[in-house]
Amino acid sequence: MWTGPSTRSYRWCAPEPRRSPRHSAAEPARPRTAGSRGAPRRRCAPACPRTDGRQRPPSPAHRRGCPVAHQASAPHHAPPPSGSHPEENESHPRVFEPVLLVILVVLAAVGAVIGIDLVSKLGISANTSVVGALVAMLIGRIPLGFLRRMRSVHRQNLAQSAISAATFASANALLTSVAIPYVFGRQDLVWPMLAGSFIGLLVDAWVLYRAFGSRLLPADAAWPPGTAAAETIKAGDRGGRRALILAGGTAVGLAGTLLSLPLWLRRALTGHRVVLMDQRGTGRSAPVDRRTLARFGADHRAAADHLALFRADSIVRDAELLRRNLQDDRPWSVLGQSFGGFATLTYLSLAPEGLTQAYITGGLPTLTGHADDVYRAAYARTLAHNERYFARYPGDQRLADAVAAHLEAHDVRMPTGERLTVRRFQTLGITFGTSAKFDSLHYLLETAFTDGARGPELTDTFLRGVDAAVSFAERPLYAALHEPIYAQGPSPTGWSAHRVREEFPAFDARPGSPLRFTGEMVYPWQFDEDPSLVPLRGAAEILAARTDWPALYDLGQLAANQVPVVAAVYHDDMYVDREHSLATAAAVRGLRTWVTPDHAHDGVRADAAVLDRLLSMASGKD
């Protein structure tokens, strides 16, 4: 959950005056009359914020005569009025100042190393502008006289520009252009390509400098990295709490490179404070598992009533309590991925006053459909993903069939002592729904068999990998509530996935038929075969038969919705049906969708561009 983007208001800037169309927001100084001494000198056009919060950049003509650098990575912000800023009348620093030049060279070298390392190892290009800004601010606070000049926001701007430009140039322009001919064995093209890339960089820099702030490259367009760098510099310059927030987000982003912090979170931290709420029963919230439920003893109905309190309606009430505790009654924005999107629709139904904006990725559920409708559509999609998998790995069909035959003929035990049955082996198909795990079954099957004393046997490596994938020991709540999250009104779920599977005989494991894997379904027999679920069997049966479920969505409220909502709908999502999602989008007033075939269910985790697209849609840029 996001507590809102950082503010961009400037106290020292007067409200923008009304002007006729033929006057700009700020005009350059008039040239001196003939005979006046000295050459005319232009003044900078201040970029005062408008009433809508966006800056009005100076025109290209003003910019060319302005002593303040305008970079694409850090848009110019106007100086405060006379007397409010110590550097008001300071001329723009020169790159060749000895101390500044050394700092820029060092930062450029560091940026080049970062760029080459990331593009060669991960295939990504990072923006390091905020890093340069923070380093420059830290240097300026060293109590040495010759370093105090680095407190200038203009020198900090040059620092962030130097490191970000070096990162991009080394990775995207120089290394890539040299590596491609080298890989193809054309070493004779390496030096010509390097020279051409270098010349291209110079031309690109000149064109960017001349075009930035024009209609071709407007300064007030969406520049997320540049905005982050500019806001960091301004926050540090004013020494306020905002600097701590931005620096903290940057520190987390840097740590994320080493600690695998999700890309979407790094992107979100550039403009928001992020609250990651462990919903009730998960993460560091009070756990719900066989041990905590043991306090109900044989009273399965009491355990079932307790589990029924962990659905989306209760999660929304928790979120509202947290919001008021953190920031009084100020609303916030929410990002809901998968089931988080389900909870977001419930949030819009029960407490829309707590939201300013809602972002949903792969999580628009059916508002009125029964669980049978959900699983009927899910089985068809899962079969399609089976075909995709075996088209990519045709040799795995023979291996999967051999494993199933071996499990049918032998009592095979996993390292935990549980028996691995064919139907439990089939549940490995749940990995087909994400880009991160789509190939995991293939690598697991590669380790399946070894030559044992009595012939082929399944390896411990394979069995340990299967156990890690099929066990609900770490997520029993997922199994217990997988169908109840769709339940509303008097209709019981009645083990929907188990019943509907009978309509899809392709999933039956029969000798001579190709094995097909199931997907995101939970079956009653899993509460007999998985030790972590066995104590929950009685409560699960009561939940499946329950007929008094409260409504999760208020259709009238959603039809009159006033909260801006944007949603990414993945065209081939194995877990959330596209048609159900689009029907729901049509029922929510003002909800805008982006349907994309380029991502699986984990698109927002795999590619920060998904969140970028939603942020752009929400801001009206897309």
Image (tube, grey):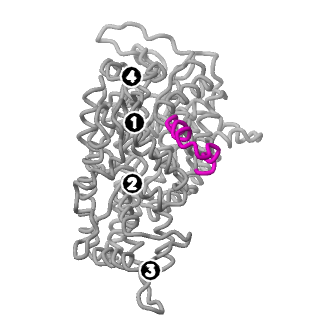
Q: Quadrant of residue 73?
A: top left
Q: Amino acid at mark 3?
A: Leu
The image shows residue 88 at horizontal and vertical percentages of 60, 23
Residue under numbered circle 3: 458
Prevalent SS, magenta region: helix
Q: Amino acid at mark 4?
A: Val
- Is 339 covered by the magenta stretch? no
The residue segment tinted magenta is 290-310
Q: Give the residue at the far right of this rendering.
A: 143
- SS label for mark 2: loop
- Front residue of 547 and 168: 547
Q: Is residue 528 left or right of residue 603?
A: right
| First in residue order: circle 1 vs circle 2 | 1
Q: Which mark is in front, 4 or 3?
A: 3
Q: Quadrant of residue 320?
A: top right
Instruction: Classify 124 as above or below 78.
Output: below
- Is 305 covered by the magenta stretch? yes
- Front residue of 331 and 347: 347
Residue under numbered circle 4: 563
Instruction: Classify 337 as above or below 368.
Output: below
The image shows residue 480 at horizontal and vertical percentages of 47, 47
